[in-house]
Image: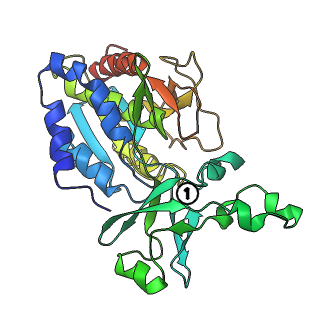
């Protein structure tokens, strides 16, 4: 699963501009990240782009993108998950259709899969991205059938059409079992400063953290600041848990801020202990983890919407945190 060769360089060039210009282009960065896909466990393309965009960053043993500033205590960690809930190819039927299986253990609402019906998707095969569409039950052919035909769409009902007429034709496109599948994404700007996209709050929060790390003064504050873009959130925060265990083993455990997730209208800047079933497990030695989220409208839908003004405000708060001012 690789992006075109120029994607990482374009993202790096966007952030290489002077500070004032970079602030003006934060909205472009939000849109760029929102257009990317990173199914949990298959985040390599996103990681490559972030590595190029954040000089001095490196991959740790879990594949997280980690950037460190300063040394000694106290330690401040700000992390944002790269991955998203997505799908993989479960099987390929004899007539060339793909079935789907959801990736990850994060609980979702019944509507989450229903939003997929009739939508364009992208299948990341061995030969590159392949466009497809999730089929819709024929109204004409189902007319007059039993009442069961009106049952809600379920993931087991999904059949992805990639234009193949046989399993062999699908294989010739480079598609196999476990190939990642995501909704075809195109972030949409509307109104004065709104951006809508699937998982818009997560991607915008990562954009804010990336911008904050780029603009943080190197000589401010004391101690160590760690910025991390972590993997496999949808598998019980596996990447973030590894990062905290690894850092705590050195005896320098401190405070942690976790980004991402759509919050209520007044959530910007509020720090609260996460209490959901899919919250980050905190290794011993760390002070209580706090969670910062972006206010979002239409949360957990394909048109999840965030305000660019809120993203800019979050970036400033994160820069202060990295510099040790809060």
Q: Quadrant of the N terminus?
A: bottom left
Under tag 1, what secondary structure? loop
Measuring from the top left, give residue 307's x and y in whole percent: 44, 21
Q: Nearer the viewer, residue 194 or 234?
A: 194
Q: Residue at x 32, y 13 (%)?
A: 325
Side (left or right) of 112 relative to 240: right
Q: Residue at x 47, y 57 (%)?
A: 121
Q: Is residue 326 above or below residue 278?
A: above
Could one spot residue 201 in this view of the protein?
Answer: yes
Side (left or right) of 277 relative to 132: right
Q: Which residue is mark 1?
A: 104
Q: Residue furthest front?
A: 140
Q: Is residue 145 above or below residue 281?
A: below
Could one spot residue 253 in this view of the protein?
Answer: no
Measuring from the top left, give residue 256's x and y in whole percent: 43, 31
Q: Is residue 254 above or below residue 283?
A: above
Side (left or right) of 56 relative to 288: left
Measuring from the top left, give residue 6's x and y in whole percent: 16, 50
Q: Is residue 302 above or below residue 103?
A: above
The quadrant holding residue 76 is: top left
């Amino acid at each position: 699963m690789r992006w075109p060769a120029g994607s990482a360089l374009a993202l790096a060039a966007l952030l290489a501009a002077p500070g004032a210009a970079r602030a003006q282009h934060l909205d472009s960065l939000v849109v760029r990240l929102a257009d990317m896909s990173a199914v949990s466990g298959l985040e390599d393309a996103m990681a490559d782009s972030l590595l190029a965009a954040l000089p001095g960053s490196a991959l740790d043993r879990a594949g997280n993108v980690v950037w460190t500033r300063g040394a000694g205590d106290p330690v401040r960690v700000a992390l944002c998950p790269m991955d998203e809930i997505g799908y993989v190819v479960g099987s390929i039927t004899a007539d060339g259709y793909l079935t789907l299986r959801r990736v990850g253990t994060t609980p979702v609402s019944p509507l989450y899969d229903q939003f997929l019906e009739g939508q364009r998707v992208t299948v990341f095969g061995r030969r590159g991205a392949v466009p497809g569409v999730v089929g819709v039950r024929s109204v004409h052919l189902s007319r007059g059938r039993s009442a069961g035909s009106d049952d809600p769409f379920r993931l087991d009902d999904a059949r992805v059409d990639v234009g193949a007429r046989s399993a062999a034709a699908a294989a010739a496109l480079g598609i196999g079992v476990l190939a990642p599948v995501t909704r075809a994404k195109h972030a949409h700007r509307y109104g004065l400063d709104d951006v809508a996209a699937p998982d818009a709050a997560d991607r915008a929060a990562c954009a804010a953290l990336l911008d904050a790390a780029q603009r943080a003064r190197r000589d401010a504050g004391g101690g160590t600041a760690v910025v991390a873009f972590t993997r496999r959130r949808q598998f019980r925060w596996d990447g973030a848990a590894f990062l905290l265990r690894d850092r705590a083993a050195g005896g320098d455990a401190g405070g942690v801020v976790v980004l991402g997730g759509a919050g209520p209208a007044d959530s910007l800047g509020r720090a609260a202990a996460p209490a959901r079933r899919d919250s980050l497990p905190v290794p011993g030695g760390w002070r209580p983890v706090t969670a910062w989220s972006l206010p979002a409208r239409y949360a957990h839908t394909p048109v999840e919407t965030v305000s660019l003004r809120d993203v800019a405000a979050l970036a400033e708060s994160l820069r202060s945190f990295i510099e040790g001012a809060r």
